[in-house]
């Protein structure tokens, strides 16, 4: 359905000074996970597609002057065995594709269309493969009535905050036709003050790499208006001794509903994992423009009986407790423990009856105006999809409205759709 027309390599317009940036424990544990895949759809006349593509490639070259590590490759040091980003200007992939029979409407259905996967490059790539694959790949696809701009970035080099910093900066350069971006990325690893030598994992990037094959999944986007989320927040804070956020209320609501849809026995345990941005939680704080993967996954546990018997304030309160308490001391303790016994996450290790929450409604996704106006939709590739994966996006209407991209087996998804307590919100 989607045809690739050209593939080129884009290099930084100004050569970067060769250097190595250490890949830190928080990033190393992601080596066997997929790259991040996120893209935006724009409803603009595709008549000037070639000029748009040339413009995007040219501004990407300028962007890489600031985001030069993404034009490099991973390397394993023969001296200390650590993994580094070698900033050697090897370049990034830039792909031009077309799907003249595919419209924006085809790609923005509540059930995510299989064709969405074809909008992204490097599908299935694992972060360890950044030793020989680009750390960034861009695919720009001409649609029947618009354009899709989709990025694939190594998750051992960038987290969601850094990903959208990159995207926001690119749109700014394209829109303003300048060389300055609102905030230059910061790469100084000493700011984390982690101490300790590089971690030697001993993985052979040319050897066997474990691959995860998910079961058949339905991927559906559920929209929650600002008013509906406000009602959930009011409900969980009624009589609560702590202030529970809108995000915690929404995640608690989803956790209960998916647990019901899975039909778990009363004493079966279920976990909810949340990816937490550590920049403002470390002491001293990292600048918001610190570029890297600076997240940790923290979790709460409950039985199916507890989730069904107690009010919504119970799961939301559990989330509030783990999130509010995860500050500098807890963060560094987790890192120290990982150094003693490094564990690299593989997707087949995701626990049964688990929900994993990624992305954030705070990311500036709909502010990416390349000069064509705001995007009409955000879409994710198939990377890191499994039973229970949930991606949180702001909704285009703004004002605190949110969209949840939920991955579940078809039978479980059918039950979630038919759950009046969940759909009423």
Image: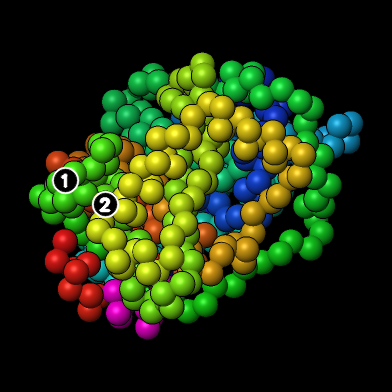
Residue 371 quadrant: top left
| Residue 150, x across and y down, in percent | 41, 51
Name the residue: 63% across, 33% down.
Answer: 333
Q: Does residue 394 appear anywhere in the picture?
A: no
| Residue 86, x across and y down, in percent | 71, 32
| Residue 75, x across and y down, in percent | 76, 39
Work out whether residue 401 or residue 78 is closer to the camera in this orientation and state it: 401
Name the residue: 71% across, 22% down.
Answer: 195
Q: Which quadrant would the N terminus be assigned to in this image?
A: bottom left
Work out whether residue 47 or residue 251 is closer to the camera in this orientation and state it: 251
Name the residue: 35% across, 34% down.
Answer: 168
State the residue position of label 2: 313
Residue 422 quadrant: bottom left
Range of magenta residues: 408-416
Of labels 1 and 2, earlier in sequence is 1
Measured in 3D between alpha carbons, the distance from the residue under mark 1 to the one under mark 2, in whole angstroms, is 8 Å
Tag 1–tag 2 contact (CB < 8 Å):
yes
Q: How crowded is mark 1: few (under 14 residues within 10 Å), some or many (20 or more)?
A: few
State the residue position of label 1: 238
Work out whether residue 39 or residue 103 is closer to the camera in this orientation and state it: 39
| Residue 326 highlighted magenta (yes or no) | no
Where 416 sits versus 366, above or below?
Answer: below
Question: What is the secondary structure assignment of the residue under circle 1?
Answer: loop
Question: What is the secondary structure assignment of the residue under circle 2?
Answer: helix
In the drawing, does residue 223 fall left or right of residue 256? left
In the drawing, does residue 43 fall left or right of residue 158? left
| Residue 251, x across and y down, in percent | 32, 54
Q: Which quadrant would the C terminus be assigned to in this image?
A: bottom left
């Amino acid at each position: 359905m989607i045809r690739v027309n050209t593939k080129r390599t884009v290099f930084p317009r100004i050569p970067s000074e060769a250097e190595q940036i250490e890949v830190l424990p928080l990033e190393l544990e992601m080596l066997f996970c997929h790259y991040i895949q996120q893209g935006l759809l724009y409803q603009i006349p595709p008549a000037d597609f070639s000029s748009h593509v040339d413009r995007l490639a040219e501004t990407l070259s300028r962007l890489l002057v600031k985001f030069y590590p993404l034009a490099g490759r991973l390397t394993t040091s023969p001296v200390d065995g650590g993994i580094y980003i070698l900033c050697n200007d090897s370049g990034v992939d830039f792909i031009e594709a077309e799907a003249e029979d595919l419209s924006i409407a085809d790609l923005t259905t509540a059930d995510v269309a299989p064709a969405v996967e074809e909008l992204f490059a490097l599908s299935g790539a694992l972060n360890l493969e950044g030793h020989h694959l680009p750390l960034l790949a861009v695919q720009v696809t001409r649609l029947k009535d618009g354009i899709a701009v989709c990025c694939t970035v190594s998750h051992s080099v960038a987290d969601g905050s850094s990903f959208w910093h990159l995207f926001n900066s690119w749109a700014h350069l394209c829109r303003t036709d300048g060389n300055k971006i609102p905030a230059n990325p910061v790469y100084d690893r000493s700011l984390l003050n982690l101490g300790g030598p590089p971690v030697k994992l001993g993985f052979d990037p040319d050897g066997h790499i474990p691959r995860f094959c998910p079961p058949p999944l339905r991927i559906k986007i559920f929209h929650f208006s600002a008013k509906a989320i406000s009602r959930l927040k009011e409900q969980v804070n009624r009589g609560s001794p702590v202030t529970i956020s809108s995000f915690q209320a929404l995640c608690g609501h989803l956790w209960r509903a998916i647990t019901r849809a899975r039909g778990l026995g009363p004493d079966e345990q279920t976990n909810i994992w949340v990816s937490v941005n550590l920049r403002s939680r470390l002491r001293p704080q990292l600048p918001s423009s610190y570029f890297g993967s600076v997240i940790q996954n923290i979790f709460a546990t409950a039985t199916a009986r507890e989730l069904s018997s107690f009010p919504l304030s119970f799961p939301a309160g559990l989330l509030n407790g783990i999130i509010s308490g995860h500050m500098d001391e807890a963060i560094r303790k987790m890192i120290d423990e990982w150094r003693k016994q490094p564990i690299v996450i593989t997707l087949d290790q995701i626990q049964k009856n688990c929900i994993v929450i990624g992305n954030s409604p705070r990311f500036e996704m709909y502010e990416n105006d390349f000069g064509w106006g705001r995007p009409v939709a955000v879409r994710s590739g198939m990377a890191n999809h499994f039973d229970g994966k949930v991606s949180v996006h702001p909704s285009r209407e703004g004002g605190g409205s949110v969209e949840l991209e939920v991955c579940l087996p078809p039978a479980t998804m059918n039950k979630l759709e038919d759950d009046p307590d969940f759909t009423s919100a």
